[in-house]
Amino acid sequence: MIRGMQVVAHRGASAEKAEHTLGAYLAALEAGADALECDVRLTADQHLVCVHDRTLARTAANPGLVSTMELRDLAELDFAAWKHPWSELDDEAPDMDPELGKVLTLRKLLETVADYDRRVELAIETKHPTRFGGLVERRLVEMLAEFGWTGPDAPVRIMSFSFTALQRVQRLAPDLPLVMLMDKAHHWPMLRRLVDPDWIIGPGIKELKAHPGFGRRLHQSGRRIHVWTVNTKANLELCQSLGVEAVITDKPDTMLRLLGRK
């Protein structure tokens, strides 16, 4: 574990580059991010891809569903153009390798991390509900096992808003750290009776700001806390006051500078 607060690039350096593209993750690595965060979904032909939404309308200008399309179909789409729609009209804009804006498979992201010249961790979120149910977690653990990343020293943790999904991962790979994501502070009184004491709690920064007592109770109980999505100095300072272990951010370069690490 990296000493001090870990800076996790949310979908890559997504404030700067199109989310979940290889270009966004390479920018995050260059910035010095300690870890990379991604969401994974299964395609119709059972490939894990790094895509947040169930539909492709927002990030690829396509009405299709990730779960009903094959990888070869996704590979034909542009996942980067939406971020800078006027770039083609900018004569001074640098040329970009088209491959950096294509759909990114989880395998490619794992290979990128495995080949990097320093330890980089991965925070992988499984999205639910999905038509594939628990097959998502099964395929994910199988792929991690190919890389030898299911043991206690693996640079990987699994996150989800689904308690059931995390239970599946716990059965399949009991040594992997798990993060129970939360977007409603009022769910905690119920969840704390169910969530394993070793699980990390992952609240959104909006909930910590709206319900100050929630964060204090988590901190006082000794829970490990990872917070999303932290993009400002004020929010970073709030996380520091609560002993937060990791901040998930669209702006890894900015957070590293604010922490005095650049």
Image (tube, helix red, strand yellow):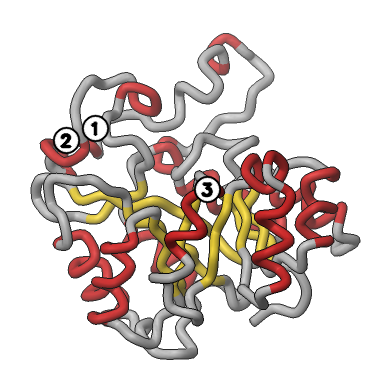
Q: Would you say 156 lies left or right of 91 here?
A: left
Q: State the SS at label 1.
A: loop
Q: Earlier in the sequence, mark 2 or mark 3?
A: 2
Q: State the SS at label 3.
A: helix
Q: State the SS at label 2.
A: helix
Between 75 and 50, the residue placed more toward the observer is 50
Amino acid at dot 3:
His
- In the image, residue 25 lies at what x, y percent? 53, 52
- In the image, residue 150 lies at what x, y percent? 35, 84
Residue at the image point whose x is 43% and y is 70% from the top: 193
Quadrant where the N terminus is found in the figure: bottom right
Of badges 2 and 3, nearer the viewer stands 3
Cα gap from disc 1 to disc 3, whole angstroms = 43 Å
Amino acid at dot 1:
Glu
- Looking at the rendered structure, which numbered label has been put on residue 186? 3
Reply above or below: 59 against 241: above
- Looking at the rendered structure, which numbered label has been put on residue 198? none
The residue beneath circle 1 is 76
- In the image, residue 260 lies at what x, y percent? 90, 61
Residue at the image point whose x is 73% and y is 61% from the top: 216
Q: Residues within 10 Å of mark 3 (few under 14, many from 20)?
A: few
Between 23 and 177, the residue placed more toward the observer is 177
Q: Would you say 37 lies left or right of 102 here?
A: right
Q: Residues within 10 Å of mark 1 (few under 14, many from 20)?
A: few
Residue 21 falls in image quadrant? top left
| CB-based contact (under 8 Å), mark 2 and mark 1 | yes
Reply above or below: 164 against 87: below
Residue at the image point whose x is 19% and y is 46% from the top: 130
The residue beneath circle 2 is 73
Q: Earlier in the sequence, mark 1 or mark 3?
A: 1
Residue 81 falls in image quadrant? top left
